[in-house]
Each structure stands twice: as C-alpha cells, then as structure tokens.
C-alpha cells in the first residue's frame, strides 16, 4: 500500500418502501449510478423509523445517515413523513446539544419517479460526509 | 423556531392561568402544620375520600407516598418533604393506571410531579378525573444520597434553607439538588396543571394563600367555606421575580454545562463511569414502558456481532451500548421530561444525568414548540404534526447535483 487511501465514508440510506425505494427502482430502470459505499435500507415508512435506528449506526460505524420518504402530502399512510420530520428534528436537536454533528443526518423527500434525485442525494451526501471527515464516534471503544 | 412557532408558543404562555384571588389559610404554627391541619379538616368533612401524601417512614430516614383515609396518620404527613425518593407522577400513575376509580383522592405533590402526572395522562398511563392535585411553591429537594448520609441533619438543612420564608430571595437553593437550583417551574404560574396551589411566596406572616386553579379547586374552597377574596398581587409579583432569576440561572448553568459535555471526547468523559444499571430509567416517571428497548432482546446479539463491532472500533466496551442507551432513552422521553431530577437521585455514579437531560429537554421541546406538563390539551409532539413547520430539517434540492467524483460507481 502506498500512502493514505482517500477516506471513503460508510453511509446508511433509509428509504421508505413507497417513495424512497421507488426512487431507487426508477434510478435502476434508468441505469443511474450512486456511490457504492451508500448502503440502502428499506423501512416501511419513514414515520415508523425509530430515532434509535438513526443514532445507532452513527455510534457503531456509519459516517452519515440519510433518510428519504414521500413528499409532503404523498405519504402512503397520509402523515408518516410529517411525523418523520418531527422525529428527525428531535434527533438533530439531541445530536446538536451533545455536539455530535447533526449535519451527519440528512432528511430529503424523494418521490417514486425521482430516480435522478435519489442518486443525486446519495452522491451529494457522500461528498458532504467526505468533507466532514470520519465520524469520531465510530472508532471510540468506550461507547 | 420560525415565526409561526413563536406565536404558538406565546399563545400558550398567555393562557397560563392567572387567578386573581385566593383564600387565606392562617398559619401561625408554620406552613406545614397549617396545611396538614387544613387537609385533615377537609378529610373529616368528606371533601375528599382519601389522600395520597408523603409521610416520613417509621425508620425516620426517608419519605414515602401513603394512600390514607385515616386522619390520625395524616398527623405525621410532610406535604413538602426534604427529598423526593419516589416521583409523585409515578405514584399517581400506579394508582390510576387502570382507571379513575370511584373515590375522590387528593394528591399532594411538587409542581414537577404534577407536570409529570399530566404527561403520563397524555401517555395513557394515568387518569386525573377523580384526583385533586394540590401543589405548593417548591424550593427544591435535597440530593437523596446527601440526605441519606444523615437524615436528621438533612432535614434540618432543608428546613433551614426553606423554613417559613416568604420571599424568593431568602430561599437558599444552595443545599438543593443541582437540577432544583436551576428549576424555573417551581410554582403554579409556570405549570398551571394543579387544582389547588399553596402559595407561600409573598404571603404575609401567619398566613398562606390557597389558590384555586381549576373549577374543581374552586369547589373545594367553596365546600370548605373559605372565602376566595385575598388579593394575590404580592404572590404573583414574587413568583414572577423568582421565575426571572431562576430562568437566568438555568440559562447560565446550561451554557456552562454545554461546555463540559459537547463533543464525543467530553461527552464520553461524563458518561464513561456509567455502570449500565439503568437506575435512571427505572426512576424516571416518563419511562413507563413495560419492556425497555435497551433491555430487550433487540440489543442482545450473537458474539459474532460484538466481534465485528470490536474489530471496527478497535475494541468494544462491555456491556456495550452505553451511549446508545442514554441518547436513545432521551429520544424516547425527552419531550415529556419535566426536569424532576429523579434520574440523578437514582444514579449511583454521580453522573449529572438530570442536568444533561434538562438541557436536552429544554432544547428539544423548544424545537418542537412544546412544554412538558404545560397543559392537558396540548397533544404530545410526536403524535401531532403541522404541515408547515420545521423546514430547517428538510435538505433543500434545487438542481441536478454534479458529483465531485464522477466515477464512483
């Protein structure tokens, strides 16, 4: 190995099963690519994503967590995305107060047809996290 | 907070009940004696059927809530005990979880305990319809561990700090728990959820105010033939004054606290001596779950999982998930946190958990425009939502993003 390798973040991408993963399907149909270090994870609805599942990856090895659900008014369960928005606000508030970099959590709506927006979000967040650098919590053994 | 949130916030504050008049209760022999005497009379007159009130335990080294119907036992009650071994909200929840019951029960609690009870009602863990909440201006409580070193001296220290003083500047909050020292919800005006409130601040010598704060409370005073005609200006003035000083103290303490806890390094310094006993969760009135997620099988994993994590992290502390427990627990209950300090009392390792949580709670509740225990009507913030709010958490997307590294895939 020669020199230091470029930092490649590990990113968890939570997608709701209706719009977010639909966006990823559209991206696939259009042969759009997104960074391989972004790991998609499907949840039924972003409104059903517990705050713990956003915090836990950040402690256990992820450098960033991004969440995509339906646009306002489009939620399959009517109001799941509004609830998700409140929960993300709560998590960001907690992380901010504790100085744990709330900017490592992103929340952006992606509709079923928005394949481009899905890959753009993955790529943009990947670049954003690269700039932030490695998450200091993930290498701490005392958590 | 955007403008809309701010107005919502203010509108709520303005509905805070400001009763113009209260009844006067003669208190020549001290506030506690007068209050207990009054409760006794009310019990004898069948104004209520039973009382839930802190009473010193026979061993004289702690206080416990007793549910009693016998006026003789009431003699030894302490409406404002020097410590808070059991959070009153928890006691109320245990009493009324299964329903209202057919008896009228008066409950004597501190303001933070009344606010916890209100949150528990919203969480469907308590019923208040047949309860009468009676609160009082609260000077705080002693740290349980300090008190237990020498209960008699602790009681004396509490009495000396509080005594029968009528002016907030005379209240000595120094011996109280750190989270009590920065409490700004110590009276009725900041937490208008009780039915009757004993106003000691601003009262003249030899009397205290009994303030009706709900129709139920007004009826009690009517049934007790107590005229509600004493002006409360001096009480309101002094509560206001004390609230301002306390809010300023709270702000200052929180600023200092932030400097000691922010960032992974300092945060882990604070939590590193946690022994995973989960006492904070057990003592917390808001942690009502029958099965705590952090004690569930969800976090009990096969050894391969721990080995993989140890490899990533270099090493893995056992028991793992200490930080996850604290942040995760906060995410579960922080919006209902009333800063009562029960968690810090329960911590055997002297982690300033209640202070950290009071900071987290203030900021999280402000973000979502909610005040824990502020009213029974305001819905829980994770149950309700508004369409047009919190746009600061939505990541804007304006145009097609041009990747910095095109060949990533």
Image (tube, helix red, strand yellow):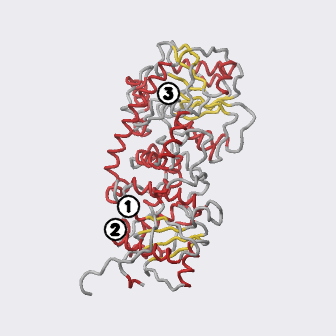
- Element assignment for label 3: loop
Disc 2, disc 1: CB below 8 Å? Answer: yes
**B164 relative position to B57: left or right:** left
Closer to the camera, B293 or B333?
B333
Residue located farthest toward the left when viewing the structure as drawn? A3
Residue B1, position as x, y percentages in the image: 46, 48
Closer to the camera, A19 or B200?
A19
Residue B286, position as x, y percentages in the image: 55, 47
Q: CA distance from mark 3 to mark 2?
A: 48 Å
Closer to the camera, B388 or A125?
B388
Q: Which mark is residue A101?
A: 1
Give the label, 3 or 2, closer to the camera. Answer: 2
**B129 relative position to A12: left or right:** right
Give the label, 3 or 1, closer to the camera. Answer: 1
Q: Chain of mark 1?
A: A
Looking at the image, residue B174 lies above or below residue B380: above
Q: Earlier in the sequence, mark 2 or mark 1?
A: 1
Residue beneath label 3, please? B137
């Amino acid at each position: 190995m020669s020199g230091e390798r470029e930092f490649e973040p590990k990113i968890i991408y939570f997608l709701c099963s209706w719009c977010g993963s639909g966006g990823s399907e559209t991206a696939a149909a259009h042969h759009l690519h997104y960074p391989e270090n972004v790991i998609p994870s499907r949840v039924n609805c972003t409104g059903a994503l517990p705050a713990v599942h956003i915090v836990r990856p950040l402690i256990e090895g992820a450098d960033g967590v991004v969440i995509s659900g339906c646009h306002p008014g489009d939620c399959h369960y009517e109001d799941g995305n509004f609830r998700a928005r409140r929960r993300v606000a709560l998590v960001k508030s907690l992380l901010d107060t504790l100085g744990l970099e709330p900017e490592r959590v992103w929340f952006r709506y992606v509709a079923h047809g928005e394949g481009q927006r899905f890959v753009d979000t993955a790529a943009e967040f990947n670049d954003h996290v690269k700039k932030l650098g490695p998450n200091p919590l993930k290498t701490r053994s005392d958590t | 907070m955007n403008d809309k949130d701010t107005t919502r916030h203010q509108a709520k504050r303005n509905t805070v009940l400001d009763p113009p008049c209260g009844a006067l209760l003669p208190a020549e022999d001290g506030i506690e004696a007068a209050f207990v005497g009054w409760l006794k009379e009310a019990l004898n007159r069948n104004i209520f059927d039973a009382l839930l009130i802190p009473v010193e335990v026979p061993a004289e080294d702690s206080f416990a809530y007793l549910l009693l119907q016998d006026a003789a036992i009431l003699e030894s009650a302490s409406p404002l005990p020097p410590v808070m071994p059991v959070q009153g909200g928890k006691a109320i929840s245990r009493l009324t979880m299964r329903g209202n019951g057919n008896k009228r029960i008066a409950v004597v609690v501190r303001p933070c305990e009344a606010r916890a009870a209100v949150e528990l009602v919203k969480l469907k863990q308590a019923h208040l319809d047949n309860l009468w909440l009676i609160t009082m201006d609260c000077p705080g409580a002693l740290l349980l561990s300090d008190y237990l070193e020498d209960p008699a001296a602790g009681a004396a220290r509490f009495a000396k700090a509080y005594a029968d003083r009528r002016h907030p500047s005379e209240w000595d909050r120094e011996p109280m728990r750190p989270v009590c020292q920065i409490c700004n919800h110590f009276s009725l005006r900041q937490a208008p959820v009780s039915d009757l409130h004993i106003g000691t601040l601003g009262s003249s010598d030899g009397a205290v105010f009994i303030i009706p704060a709900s129709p139920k409370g007004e009826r009690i005073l009517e049934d007790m033939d107590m005229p509600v005609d004493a002006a409360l200006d001096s009480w309101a003035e002094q509560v206001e004054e004390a609230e301002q000083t306390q809010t300023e103290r709270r702000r200052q303490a929180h600023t200092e606290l932030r400097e000691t806890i922010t960032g992974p390094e300092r945060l882990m310094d604070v939590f590193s001596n946690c022994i995973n006993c989960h006492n904070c969760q057990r003592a917390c009135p808001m942690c009502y779950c029958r099965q705590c997620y952090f004690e569930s099988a969800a976090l009990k994993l096969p050894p391969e999982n721990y080995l993989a994590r140890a490899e990533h992290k270099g090493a893995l502390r056992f028991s793992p998930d200490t930080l996850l427990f604290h942040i995760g627990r906060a995410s579960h209950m922080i919006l209902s946190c009333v800063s009562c300090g029960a968690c810090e009392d329960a911590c055997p390792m002297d982690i300033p958990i209640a202070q950290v949580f009071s900071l987290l709670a203030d900021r999280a509740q402000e973000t979502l425009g909610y005040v824990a225990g502020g009213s029974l009507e305001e819905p829980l913030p994770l149950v309700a939502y508004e369409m047009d709010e919190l746009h600061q958490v939505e990541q804007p997307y304006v145009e097609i993003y041009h990747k910095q590294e095109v060949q990533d895939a």
